[in-house]
Image (cartoon, grey):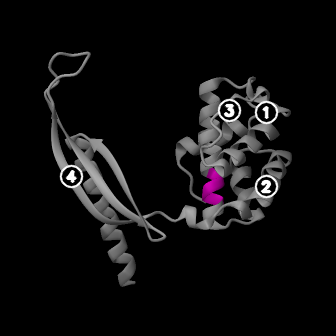
Amino acid sequence: MELSDSVQRGLRSLGDESVVDHATFPALVDVCFRSLLSAGRDAGLLEEPELKQVEGVLLKRIHAATTTFILEAVRQNADESTISSCLEDLSFSSERIEILYSCYQVTSTSFPHHCLQPAHITDVSWRLQYHVKNGVVDKVNEPFYLISLNTENKGSPEDITFTCTMEQLQDMVGKLKDAAKSAEKASQM
């Protein structure tokens, strides 16, 4: 399982007994699984009393890394050996691996697999806008783009709208071109 550096750092912190003690670990793992299953309906999960021993920013990093790991494991339908070897590489003790894997086993079937499939983009529209000034600075004078992606997931349409600067838009277009080239190469094999 390939994980980004930030996810690996967060998971190393989770596995480090000097950062997350023995009593806090199961509660933190449980919170990570519950936050994924609640789909954002329970915003106070990270404020549970058992988690007060972990510093706020570090707690959020660990939570983000752990939920990313869980979603990747579910997406790949990872088995115990895959999860164990990945966590062993990140210096997890066998006891912590067992706790995390037992939560994974219990809840992995609860994840709706259609939620892990991204929506299909059916259309894109854009509009160039211009910031003249804002409440902090009298003159801003910078252009930005309002992008609207028309998507469809399981037959229901949904619009995703966001703004970006010209540099961000160019970066996104470059990444989309790279993805299209990779997909084209994969289809020719």
Question: Which residue carries the number 1 mark?
Answer: 17
Residue 113 image position (x, y, % from top left): 61, 66
- Say whether disc 4 or disc 3 marks the residue closer to the N-terminus: 3
Q: Residue at x 86, y 46 (%)?
A: 95
The residue at 69%/50% (across/down) is 89
Characterize the local packing of mark 3: few (<14), some (14-19) or many (20 or more) Cα atoms within 10 angstroms: some
Task: Assess disc 4: are there few (<14), some (14-19) or many (≥20) residues with their C-alpha within 10 Å of its C-alpha.
Answer: few
Q: How dense is the environment of label 1, judged by Cα within 10 Å: few (below 14), some, or many (20 and up)?
A: some
| Residues shaded magenta | 69-73
Return the residue nearer the eye: 19 or 141: 141
- Give the CA distance from mark 1 to mark 4: 49 Å
Label 2's element? helix
* Residue 121 on the magenta span: no
Residue 177 appears anywhere in the view: no
User: Of the residues under marks 3 and 2, which one precedes in the sequence?
Assistant: 3
Q: Residue 17: give x, y in percent of width and height.
A: 79, 33
Which residue lies at the image location 30% right of the left edge and 60% below the top edge? 176
Mark positioned earlier in the residue sequence (2 or 1): 1
| Main SS of residues in magenta | helix
Can you say whether 55 is above or below 5 in the image?
A: above
User: Which of label 3 and label 2 is nearer to you?
Assistant: 3
Q: Is residue 27 visible?
A: yes
Q: Which residue is mark 4?
A: 126
- Badge 4 amino acid: Trp
Left or right placement of residue 74 versus residue 122 in this view = right
Name the N-terminal-most of marks 4 and 2. Answer: 2
Mark nearer the N terminus (1 vs 4): 1
Q: Are marks 4 and 2 in contact (CB under 8 Å)?
A: no
Please identify the quadrant where the N terminus is shown.
bottom right
